[in-house]
Amino acid sequence: MSKNTKPNILFIMTDQQSAHMMSCAGTSWVNTPNLDRIAKKGILFNRAYCSNPVCIPSRFSLFTGKLPEVMGLRSNAHKHLPICDKKILENGMGHLLIKEGYECFFSGKQHFPGYKAEDLGFMVLTKDERDELAKVASEFIKREHDKPWLLVTSFINPHDVCYKAIGDYIIDNDLDIETFQKSIEYKTYSLFNKIPEGVTSEAFYKDICPPLPINHKPQKDEPAILQDFLDQRLFKKYIASTYTEKDWRLHRYIYKKLTELVDVQIGKVLDALENSNYAENTLIVFTSDHGDMDGSHRFEHKTLFYEEAIKIPLIISHPGYLKEGIKTNILASNGLDLFPTILEYIGGKIPNNLQGINLLNAMNNPQYERWFIPIESELGRCIVTRDVKYAMYDYNENKEQLYDYIADPLETNNHINSPKHQTKISKIKKQFENQWSEESIIKNVSPLLL
């Protein structure tokens, strides 16, 4: 990159897409050719995680570079919280890139805790989250621009998979079916919630429908708080207790189809970029706000600390300037690290009050790598390292969990009492306490607020 030019930035987001839901990630039963072409010319981060596995906290983190708990945010429920401090918003992604000479635009789903994309420095092009978003974003890219630009395209899917479980509960229990049928979510629910025409049930479940996940059975010694999690909303408990193998597999089929649907929408935006004047000087970032349990441990939806919910796709591509077709296993937090990575890449400076790292530096210099990633949830907190994950849920039996990525990557057992892990657990516990001490939480807001 020459000293006098800054790259444009195309920031593509999906909603509720787990890391494994890409064919370039090695999943044979999902087809994502457009995400694959970003990965082919970019860097795929195999070990990328969100800051909190639900929408609002994760999105807060992505565009501020801070853990959600700095504003007391641990779930999508935020109306009881104080208004987000202006100093955080004024140092959001849009505002800081404007200072670097950019025009910053947001399109699609926002879902922020009590503020709007404009408060983070963005101009909003559209609030549509589907096909209209792809059209508007494509038209934007084709226009002439006097300044370098950042364009966020925030797609809703495959999030509509949520309505498989919700819809089944509503319909099976004869609840407010009429209202549900009027929703846009019902359209996607009904579009894929069936065996395709001309296909027999036998052929569908034999050749088309994804298999059950290998770790479909509940974890041994699972945190007892997870039963309370099911009780929070009746549809969760209903699904967990009534779904058959075919129900779970149909759920996975819908997740597959919605993922492929949004891949097509992303493809339209990529086509527009490739046919524009900005193809050679645009940094592409692709990620998702969190994953989906996708039938693992007999759960759907998100919130939990299992890999399916917290591990997300992350691809960074700038052909001609960054390595191409690379897969890396360095630990990455999209909520903490993407913001500072983008800032430094365009020649800016990472604010001292951000906890994140420049992922591109970490790839080339092991001294900059993370040794852990902090993750929060309404149910507790956890720390991810290269070989283990330590989770502390808020209450109830088996609240302390250790997952061994090497010996038990499917998270089928709790290894907290394993003798071979005790030294490692001691180190992680100290970091855990430091990460979420009252002083650390305050410092992570801003030095100006101390």
Image (spheres, rainbow, N blue to C red):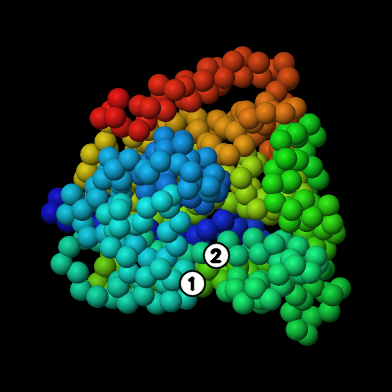
Quarter that holds the C terminus: top left
Disc 1 target residue? 130
Relative placement, left or right, of 211 versus 285 is: right
The residue positioned 38% from the left and 36% from the top of the image is 356
- Mark 2 lies on a secondary structure that is loop
Q: Please say if 300 is above or below 246.
A: above
Q: Please say if 144 is above or below 5.
A: below
Find residue 254 and report its horizontal and vertical position in percent. 68, 67
**Disc 1 and disc 2 in contact, CB within 8 angstroms:** yes
Q: Amino acid at mark 2?
A: Asn
Find residue 65 and report its horizontal and vertical position in percent. 37, 41
Which of 78 and 344 lies nearest the eye of the viewer?
78
Could you classify mark 2 by the number of other residues whose Cα lies within 10 Å: few (under 14), some (14-19), or many (20 or more)?
A: many
- Mark 1 lies on a secondary structure that is loop
Q: Earlier in the sequence, mark 1 or mark 2?
A: 1
Find residue 126 and report its horizontal and vertical position in percent. 37, 70
Relative placement, left or right, of 34 versus 235 is: left
The residue positioned 71% from the left and 70% from the top of the image is 176
Which of 281 and 441 lies nearest the eye of the viewer?
441
**Picture quadrant of residue 206:** bottom right
The residue positioned 34% from the left and 62% from the top of the image is 106
Which of 174 and 248 lies nearest the eye of the viewer?
174
Disc 2 target residue? 157
**Picture quadrant of residue 277:** bottom left
Could you classify mark 1 by the number of other residues whose Cα lies within 10 Å: few (under 14), some (14-19), or many (20 or more)?
A: some
The residue positioned 70% from the left and 51% from the top of the image is 233
Residue 2 visible to the viewer? no
Q: Please say if 80 is above or below 105.
A: above
Q: Amino acid at mark 1?
A: Arg
Residue 87 visible to the viewer? yes
